[in-house]
Image (tube, grey):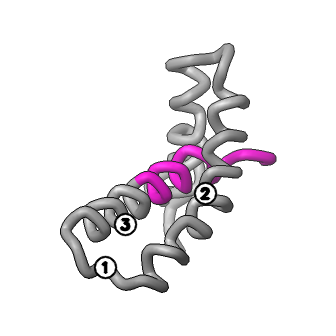
């Protein structure tokens, strides 16, 4: 049986990490999370035209990778929206 003082609760860390935005920008935190959440939902629809035509040029590939990176950032920022 593990001693409760030596166990590690990763859920507590997650809550602390979720509050970083509130510490850095308390007045806009909810708006930023909301924008991140909805951006994470909408951005994948922008992949469709790029993938339908193929990533045949360097510009199309760079655009796709930029959208993918932006989507990952939006997922990270907006994951705690509505909690």
Q: Main secondary structure of the magenta part?
A: helix
Reading the image, the residue beneath label 1 is 55
Residue 47 screen position, x and y as percent = 50, 71
The boundaries of the magenta stretch are 70-83
> Is 69 on the left or on the right of 5, as rendered?
left
* Residue 78 magenta: yes
Cα distance, mark 2 to mark 3?
A: 15 Å
Which of marks 1 and 3 precedes in the sequence?
A: 1
Q: Nearer the viewer, mark 3 or mark 1?
A: 1
Q: Nearer the viewer, mark 2 or mark 1?
A: 1
Q: Are marks 2 and 3 in contact (CB under 8 Å)?
A: no
Reading the image, the residue beneath label 2 is 40
Q: Secondary structure at mark 3?
A: helix
**Farthest top residue?**
27
Residue 2 screen position, x and y as percent = 50, 69
Task: Kindly identify the residue that appears in the image at 72 percent across and 30 percent down.
Answer: 30
Cα distance, mark 3 to mark 1?
A: 8 Å
Residue 11 screen position, x and y as percent = 59, 55
Q: Quadrant of residue 65?
A: bottom left
Viewer-proximal residue among 35 and 33: 35
Q: Nearer the viewer, mark 2 or mark 3?
A: 3
Which of marks 3 and 2 precedes in the sequence?
A: 2
Residue 8 screen position, x and y as percent = 47, 57
Please state the total of marks drawn on the protein image: 3
Q: Are marks 3 and 1 in contact (CB under 8 Å)?
A: yes
Q: Are marks 2 and 1 in contact (CB under 8 Å)?
A: no
Q: Which mark is residue 64?
A: 3
Q: Residues within 10 Å of mark 3 (few under 14, many from 20)?
A: some
């Amino acid at each position: 049986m593990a001693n409760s003082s030596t166990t590690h609760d990763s859920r507590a860390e997650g809550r602390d990490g979720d509050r970083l935005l509130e510490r850095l920008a308390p007045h806009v935190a909810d708006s930023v999370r909301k924008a991140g959440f909805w951006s994470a939902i909408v951005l994948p629809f922008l992949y469709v035209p790029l993938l339908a035509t193929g990533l045949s040029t360097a510009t199309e590939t760079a655009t796709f990778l930029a959208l993918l990176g932006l989507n990952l950032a939006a997922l990270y920022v907006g994951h705690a929206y509505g909690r």
